[in-house]
Amino acid sequence: MKMFARTIPLLALASVVLAGTESRARAGGYDIPILYTARYAGMGGTAISFVDGGAGLYLNPAGLGRIDKANIDLAVSIADGQLRGTPTFLQPEVNVKSDRVQLPFPFVTGGFRVTKFMTIGLGGYIVGGAGGEYEIPLNDGSLVTDKTEVVFFETTLGVAFNIDKIGLRIGAGYRITIGRLRRLRPDPITNLDLRMRGTDFKGFRVGFQYQPNEVFSIGATYRTKLNINLSGGEGSALAFEFDEVFTELVLPSRVGGGVRFDVKHLAIATDIEWIFNSQNQAATFMAEPDIPFDITNTFDWSDQLMARLGFEYRFLKDRLPLRWGFIYESTTTSAAFPNAFQPPPAPAYLFTVGLGYNHGPWRVDAAYGRGFSKTFVDVDTTGFIETCPNCGGPGPYKFITANHYVFDFSYNWR
């Protein structure tokens, strides 16, 4: 009990920098395995080689080049999930479920063909984020609510160029990304109440698609790394009152490529992506007025391989597509520095299904995905007070629920 009383101030302050990593039903790191739009989510999220319209602003900006005259894409993705873990190494016997949380992610994009060779597009959408609560029992038998809300919103202006004679499209998108978080833990000791936000203006996304015939297409895309500096005013933690609080969140770079084959009514697609999550090794919390010690929390993430496979079969003269897919994600979070607010430090597997209706200029689509991941962490927590004061302890870590629901509507002017 004395050790807990001495170290909880450090734990409370360090938990601020972890707010940006909290998750409920997503991949390790900040990226969510299936988002926008249902047309692609149903096929395991495969899209790089054949995405078209405004959705390309998020998936591959070269896809803007497939627009005829103009296009609008509207979508919403809902991540529904629940985790199990040991929230703090100071109470290794407390291995609990998080509250179940549903998070909506809206998506609005559109594009317009300026010339035969050039198309422009504009979109706004949430590129990542999470939120939720643990009800954590304290040593005196009471419960404390540990809550985080975090979101990354992105506005993208894109352009694509067509070289139709050889079936090549090249695209690029300029990204303005806003990070925002709320951290709340109103127990008598920690008294956490912090709100932070920041904006990065240096993001880009580039890509190409090559389709020499109606059967085969190939593509690749690259997203640049972002360092988003967050700050907030008039926060509180413990006996400290802050005029300003600061931290930095890294949205890592990401590269991927994919191919698609169409044979009559059947399509098969696969994407391979590499997410440079090792760019997140640690985060430091700072405040004004200065606190009497530095707070650094260790992530120790690894780069992540994401492999996708998708199928589509079209009925009723191609108006009714049925889709299914699979996603594999390699381990990216750290078993040496576990955290109950992150996905388990183990591989994850997701299965997807979807359907749609294509009525010429407009279409509607829906998709569902379910993820699975679990492991048992047996970790030596010696030294965590200095190196990872917000890390969890030993025990089972797993997805109890990891559902994804995606719906979209698109209209194409021809």
Image (cartoon, grey):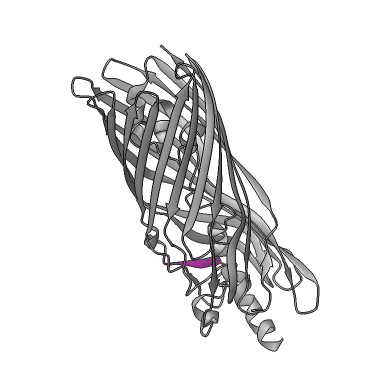
The range drawn in magenta is 281-287
The furthest residue to the bottom:
2
Specify the quadrant of the image occupied by residue 409: top right
Q: Quadrant of the N terminus?
A: bottom right
Of 372 and 209, which appears nearest the observer? 372
Asked whether the viewer can see residue 51, the reply is: no
Residue at horizontal 61%, vertical 56%? 233
In magenta segment, residue 245: no
Asked if residue 209 lies left or right of residue 180, the reply is: left
Residue at horizontal 57%, vertical 70%? 14
Percent x, y for residue 12?
A: 63, 71
Percent x, y for residue 387?
A: 49, 78
In magenta segment, residue 283: yes
Percent x, y for residue 254?
A: 36, 49
- Secondary structure of the magenta portion, mostly? strand
Q: Is residue 77 above or below residue 119?
A: below
Q: Quadrant of the C terminus?
A: top left
Asked whether the viewer can see residue 369, the reply is: yes
Specify the quadrant of the image occupied by residue 252: bottom left
Q: Is residue 207 above or below residue 15?
A: above
The furthest residue to the right:
141
Residue at horizontal 57%, vertical 52%? 25
Q: Is residue 126 above or below residue 143?
A: above
Q: How many marks?
A: 0
